[in-house]
Image (cartoon, grey):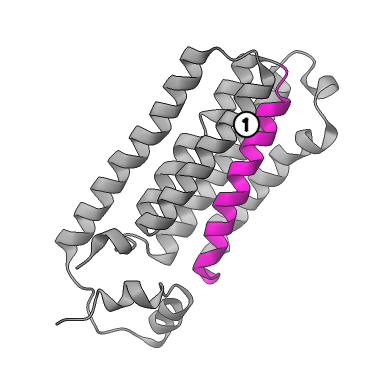
């Protein structure tokens, strides 16, 4: 079984929905906390950035409740858009400490990508996170090199650790049982991986 081209077996629709929804809601609440907890945050930050926090939190709640009904690609888009949102909030943060705190949310996003999605896609997403972090840190000019490097290593290290663990679990679990009801089959069609990944499941 070529785990390197497969998503771990833990990536069931319900598990992905609850985890992605929880992390999305947490990110939204973190943005709200940054705005309310920073002196002059409501005054200095753009209204669109201020509104991102509550909207993101509501989206996360909706994903937790109904996310298992949508196709897999929805969560990949959610991760990509969420990473851009993290970068925008960090860039608009009135203080360097707030920017670093918001960028730390990228750790959660990177772990989710390596836990639930194929390795090649997760590596591409990790690259996006690092690029966004650099795009935020360099123009601001008030974030020291040390904290920025620590944050980058934290994102990469946590993603790698979760990826190794998830694929170890996937390799030990073996092929999923064939028995499946109508609801399960509909869910499997919505969450089907590319043909190259499915081929790895076929016995030789």
Residue nearest the viewer, comparing 85 with 35: 85
Report the residue at 48% width, 76% height from top: 190
The single residue placed furthest to the bottom in the displayed view is 182
Task: Establish if 61 lies above or below 6.
Answer: above
In x, y percent, where is residue 141? 65, 15
Most foreground residue, 156 or 139: 139
Please tell me how crowded label 1 is: few (under 14), some (14-19), or many (20+) other residues with Cα within 10 Å: few
The image shows a total of numbered marks equal to 1
Answer left or right for 9 relative to 89.
left
Residue at 31% across / 43% down in the picture? 162
Residue 161 located left or right of residue 16: left
The stretch drawn in magenta includes residue 188:
no
Which residue is at a point 44% across and 80% down the rendered structure image? 189
Q: Which residues are magenta?
A: 69-94
Q: Quadrant of the N terminus?
A: bottom left
Quadrant of the rendered image containing residue 159: top left
Q: In the figure, is residue 168 to the left or right of 138?
A: left
Disc 1 element: helix
How far across and how far down the image is residue 22, in percent?
51, 46
Name the residue nearer the viewer: 186 or 170.
Answer: 170
Residue 140 location in percent, x, y?
A: 68, 20
Image height check: is 20 above or below 147? below
Q: Main secondary structure of the magenta part?
A: helix
**In the depicted structure, whether residue 195 falls above or below residue 145:** below
Q: Residue at x 38, y 65 (%)?
A: 12
Identify which residue, 199 or 61, lies in the foreground.
199
Locate residue 184, reporting x and y percent: 39, 80
Instruction: Please tell me in which quadrant of the rendered image residue 62 appears.
Output: bottom right
76 falls in the magenta region: yes
Quadrant where the C terminus is found in the figure: bottom left
Q: Which residue has dot 1 on it?
A: 135
């Amino acid at each position: 079984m070529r785990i390197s081209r497969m998503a771990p077996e833990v990536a069931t629709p319900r598990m992905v929905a609850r985890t992605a929804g929880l992390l999305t809601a947490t990110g939204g609440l973190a943005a709200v906390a940054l705005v309310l907890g920073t002196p002059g945050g409501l005054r200095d930050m753009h209204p669109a950035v201020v509104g991102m926090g509550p909207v993101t939190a509501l989206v996360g709640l909706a994903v937790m409740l109904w996310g298992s009904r949508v196709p897999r690609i929805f969560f990949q888009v959610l991760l990509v858009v969420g990473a851009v949102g993290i970068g925008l909030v960090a860039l608009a943060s009135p203080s360097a400490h707030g920017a670093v705190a918001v960028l730390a949310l990228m750790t959660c996003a990177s772990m989710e990508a390596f836990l639930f999605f194929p390795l090649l896609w997760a590596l591409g997403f990790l690259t996006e996170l690092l690029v966004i972090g650099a795009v935020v840190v360099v123009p601001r000019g008030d974030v020291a090199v040390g904290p920025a490097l620590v944050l980058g290593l934290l994102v990469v290290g946590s993603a790698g650790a979760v990826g190794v663990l998830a694929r170890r679990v996937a390799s030990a679990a073996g092929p999923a049982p064939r028995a499946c009801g109508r609801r399960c089959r509909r869910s499997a069609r919505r969450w089907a991986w590319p043909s190259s990944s499915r081929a790895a499941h076929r016995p030789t």
